Amino acid sequence: MSKMHGLAAGRNVRREAGQRVTLRTVATALGLSVTTVSRALKEGPEVNKETIELVKRVAGELGYRPNLGGINLRTGKTHAIGIVLPFGREGEMNIVVASLIEGASRYMKARGYRTTLVPQSQADDPLTGVRDIVEEGSVDGIIITHTTPQDDRVKYLLEVGIPFVTFGRTELLSAHPSVDLDHEVIGAEAAGLLLDAGHHRPLLIAPSSHFTYSLQFMRGWHKAFADRHLIAPDDLIHCTATTPDNGREMAKHVIATNPEATAAFVASEEAALGFLAGLRDVGREAGRDFALITYGGTALPDFFNPPLSSFYYSNHAIGERLAAFLHRAIAGEDPADLREVVRAAFVDHQSQILHA
């Protein structure tokens, strides 16, 4: 069949409303055999490049989707991945992870995979949620976030042998796929910026010390003080859940206990939003008598009042990277080759400097 004939055939067929497009639909549109269409979609070597391109284009225009049920039976694969996400508060969407989900799901969709979200509330046992999705056999691989140093979920996934990747590192000896930020460097740089701006007793408002990345923030914070022959007092380091409500309550607490405080690194953009409100509640004002730096994966701090200097990374790009590593893990690549630490970019709004 000539290319021109195929083009004409493809234009003459229209998908009926509610009609499922099959291999035979595409084959009829192009005047080809079902076998040829199937081989072309798989880019089989027995089909020429021109026909492969034509079949893929027309199949896409007609809305063809592979029958995953049949594929699953033949290959033993589900062609689905799971993203397990904890939520810090009930009844509210955590907007900062939405772009991470989009990045991961879009990457996997382009490779023929569906994405299943597995939300976990604070009351849920994290290990139980992961074990359930594994035992259901409904996914080929899993993405998990908010790792702990000796993460039971990671131990379990290593034991059962299902491909997975973590957003965050652990302190386990066994290598596992992971993508993370260099939180120790961020903690050190944030402390250095505040100290060098003349704040003698800056505060660190870190996530729960249960998580690995919170401990990394603290190590970096202490290192920056030590490099300047100073000691970071424990009473100036506080941990809280990364929500606006917790940030607001933390601001009121630290100002009540440290009224002389002039600066803080709030290591969560959502908590920082609440922290700004908490400062106003007690008569303090960011930019006038209190300096703030934050951290996160969105551009939200650009729109705060005032805008906050931030250590920024792209949640969307992290989602894509996690998915890419998971896809490679599913293909059987060595976990030791699937680890990456990303550097955050500092977005400077001068909020670490008081302008009174």
Image (cartoon, helix red, strand yellow):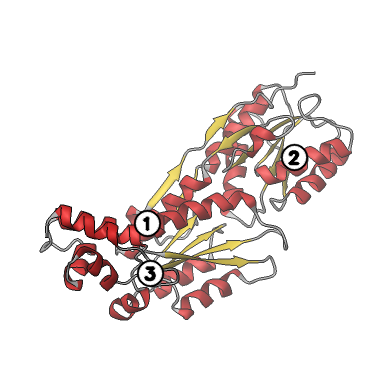
State the residue position of label 3: 79
Which residue extends farthest front? 12
Task: Give the side of residue 239 with respect to residue 30, left or right.
Answer: right
Q: Nearer the viewer, residue 88 or 192?
A: 88
Q: Residue at x 65, y 71 (%)?
A: 124
Q: Nearer the viewer, mark 3 or mark 2?
A: 3
* Percent coordinates x, y for residue 58 in the rendering: 28, 58
Q: Quadrant of residue 49?
A: bottom left
Task: Give the side of residue 8 with respect to residue 187, left or right.
Answer: left
Q: CA distance from mark 2 to mark 1?
A: 47 Å
Q: CA distance from mark 3 to mark 1?
A: 12 Å
Answer above or below: position of 157 versus 203: below
State the residue position of label 2: 236
* Percent coordinates x, y for residue 280 in the rendering: 85, 36
Q: Residue at x 35, y 74 (%)?
A: 67
Residue type for callout 2: Leu
Answer above or below: position of 348 versus 256: above
Q: Nearer the viewer, mark 3 or mark 1?
A: 1
**Between discs 3 and 2, the one toward the N terminus:** 3
Residue type for callout 1: Ala
User: Contact, CB < 8 Å: mark 3 with mark 2?
Assistant: no
Residue at disc 1, secondary structure = loop
Is there any visible trace of residue 279 in the rendered image?
A: yes
State the residue position of label 1: 110
- Quadrant holding the N terminus: bottom left
* Percent coordinates x, y for residue 212 in the rendering: 57, 53
Q: Nearer the viewer, residue 197 or 71?
A: 71
Residue type for callout 3: His
